[in-house]
Amino acid sequence: MSARKKSQKPKVAFFDFTGCEGCQLNKLNLENDLLGILELIDLVEFREAMDDKAEEYDIAFIEGSITTPSCVERIYDIRRRTKILVALGQCAVSGGINAMKNNYPLAQVQEEVYGKDKYLFPSMPAMPVRAFVQVDYEVRGCPMSMPEFLHVLKSLVLGRKPEIKDYAVCVECKLKENECVLEKGMFCLGPITRAGCDAICPSNGQYCTGCRGLVSNMNKNGAIEMLKQHGFSVEEAIKRMAMFNTNELVKEANWGNR
């Protein structure tokens, strides 16, 4: 047990909203780091692992998108009671895969999912946590990047500002000296997807699916030209990007105007 008193440790909580809870389960897979983490924090709330509840938190990690009126009420309540709020995984950061439903009329989605019981389940477009409350930091990916999560958690516990990467996955590929998968004839969203995953997919012979969202300074025109040079259309790029980035594509609605 750490020499620090339990009361001196930051109170940390994890909350799940609409999502598969894969990011929640990922944390429980950190076998080699769990004991060290628990030495540094006071884990006060985490539905996947404990029944305890708390009135306030120093750090709250939020998984899942906001998709119902009750979600909105709950995230407001959590935000009021926490000092630092971190969006965990792409559903919380951008709406993630859940946001694909936003491409269809809400009534149609409710009918297809719930049928005659649709009126029992109030719903709304899937939105990221930051659409409703202030988010202090984001851990991206589907599921979240575990090294990035550990970096953010340890930084916050130590009172430091985490370094959040905002450049393309291509940079990480070049640092690892990977052969570009576009040159292999594979489609890839690495040129416009935010780094932080250590280029895990291209490093293992797969293409980047864009699960970490778009870089903020995206070179849209350069990405379009690169895809065209490799035989891919803008329409195909938009279709593939929509899996994790439906809400982001709204901001880039003029992609096809080339």
Image (cartoon, grey):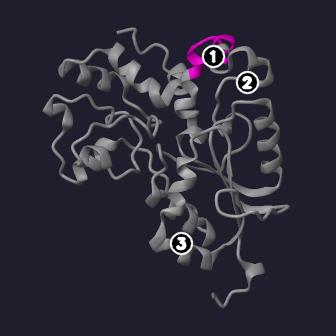
Query: Where residue 36 sits: x, y (%)?
Result: 54, 77
Q: Which residues are magenta?
A: 101-110
The residue to which callout 1 is attached is 109
Precedes in sequence: disc 2 or disc 1: 1
**Callout 2 amino acid:** Ser
Rendered image: mark on residue 42: none
Gap in angstroms between the C-alphas marked 2 and 3: 36 Å
**Callout 1 amino acid:** Val
Element type where label 3 sits in the image: helix
Could you tell me which residue is drawn at 71 percent across and 44 percent down? 134
The residue to which callout 2 is attached is 123
Query: Where residue 41 sits: x, y (%)?
Result: 66, 73
Query: Where residue 191 sits: x, y (%)?
Result: 32, 34
Gap in angstroms between the C-alphas marked 2 and 1: 9 Å
Could you tell me which residue is drawn at 82 percent across and 61 percent down? 56
Precedes in sequence: disc 2 or disc 3: 3
Count neighbours of disc 2 (C-alpha within 10 A) and say few if under 14, some if 14 to 19, many if 20 or more.
some
Count neighbours of disc 3 (C-alpha within 10 A) and say few if under 14, some if 14 to 19, many if 20 or more.
few
Whether residue 66 appears in magenta in the rendering, the answer is no
Question: For the C terminus, which image quadrant?
Answer: top left
The residue to which callout 3 is attached is 34
- Marks 2,1: beta carbons within 8 A: yes
**Mark 1 or 3: the one toward you:** 1
Q: Is residue 181 above or below residue 236?
A: below
Q: Is residue 66 left or right of residue 33?
A: right
Query: Where residue 25 sits: x, y (%)?
Result: 54, 55
Element type where label 1 sits in the image: helix
**Callout 3 amino acid:** Leu
Identify the residue at the far top of this view.
257
Which quadrant of the figure has residue 156? bottom right
Element type where label 2 sits in the image: loop
